[in-house]
Amino acid sequence: SLMSRSIKLQFRDCHTFGDLGEKVMGRPGKIWGNVIQLANFLLFLPVALLLCASALQGVVQIAAFEGCNDYYIFAIALLCLLTTQARKLSNTQVLSAISLFSVLAMAALQIIAAAMYDNEAKVQALAFGNPEEHWLTRLSQALLGTTTAAWAYVPAFLTVELATCMEEPRHFGRSLALSGVLNVVVFISVGVAVVTRWGYDVADPITLTKVAAWEQGSWLNTSLSFFLLIGNFVSYMLDSVPLARYCQRVWAPNFGDSWSAGDVAKYLAYSLPTFLFGVLLSVVVPNLFVLLAFTTALTVPWVTQIYPAVLYLRLYASQEGVASRLLTCPEGEEMQVKMATFSQKARAYVVLFVGCASFVVCLLAAIGKVAITELRGPSQIGCGSWLIWSG
């Protein structure tokens, strides 16, 4: 995130990942940046819809749906589409603030539930590794857990877009520091509290853990599902808003961008293809979490670590990069354009190495997810009276 921010400050007219890539590496850099970022956004949409639907099901049981998750997806999809109409991340501040409150509320509810209820099927966690019996399952579970480090810090996906929304992008470093601290505090506090009480095998999402706290209709389950619903709405929005904006810029670069009825209808049309694609995948893909595992491997390390490190090294550690920065610096400030220091280059190479290692780990974890039945979980197309396939 900090490297992407530095490059963004160098090229303030850039609004997307691909824009930065074009400035630093030309057209290949633009294509590379757009592919890895937009593919991540597009392929996460069906997962976000599923998570919203599951949260809605936890809040309210609709008898006519007969427990069919696809019906909940259809019910919640329109509201998800409406969040896309915000057009810019700068228009989402209120929802983002509500999302922050929801995350803190979810953290508190999980700690309360762990303190109030016991897990009768508790499997004691180990200080290192996990207690799975078969070595292949044990390794795959460890790799899947490690992938959390790759995707858990959301600002890394949207550094350029979020910095663009700020009046002074150089102050974005403060937001990155705050979000980083909050990430660490929430992960450690909730993780230690829940695993200490309930053991190693805590389900994802946590409401699938078989303890009394998450029984349908209990105040803890309903409250947590409500806040999960809000958080997942915002998660869908953060993916769909930049994606729809990109489609609009490609298909209608001269779009008026007003809030007249005509422009609202046009923008809705621009956002429909990706929305319909997400809904279609959420219904026809047998196991969305397998899709998510491969999406993580093929996009997340590249977006959050590898791509920013390559751009940074190209811009700040090469003569071509210095020449490029000289062309963009204000008159009279040429002397401030310098090569990166040894420590700065070392940090960039470390991030690049970690990104490559993360890609290997995420890919092996995805393969384990699809190959090992107990990790893959149930797979099906359709549900209820229109179940097409189940395996």
Image (tube, helix red, strand yellow):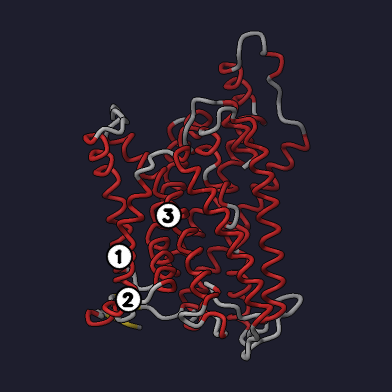
Label 2 secondary element? loop
Q: Please tell me which of labels 3 and 1 falls first in the chain.
A: 1
Residue 200, relative to residue 164: is it above or below?
Answer: below
Q: Residues within 10 Å of mark 3 (few under 14, many from 20)?
A: many
Residue, disc 3: 236
Residue 382 vs residue 21, the one in the foreground: 382
Q: Is residue 23 left or right of residue 171?
A: left
Which residue extends farthest front? 219
Q: Amino acid at mark 1?
A: Ala
Q: How far is disc 3 from disc 2 in space, using C-alphas?
A: 23 Å
Query: What residue did someone put label 2 on?
Result: 62
Closer mark to the observer between disc 3 and disc 1: 1
Image quadrant holding the N terminus, namely top right
Q: Earlier in the sequence, mark 3 or mark 2?
A: 2
Residue carrying label 1: 75
Q: Residue furthest top?
A: 332
- Residue 162 relative to residue 81: left or right: right
Name the residue located 67 percent from the left edge and 13 percent from the top edge. Answer: 333
Q: Secondary structure at mark 3?
A: helix
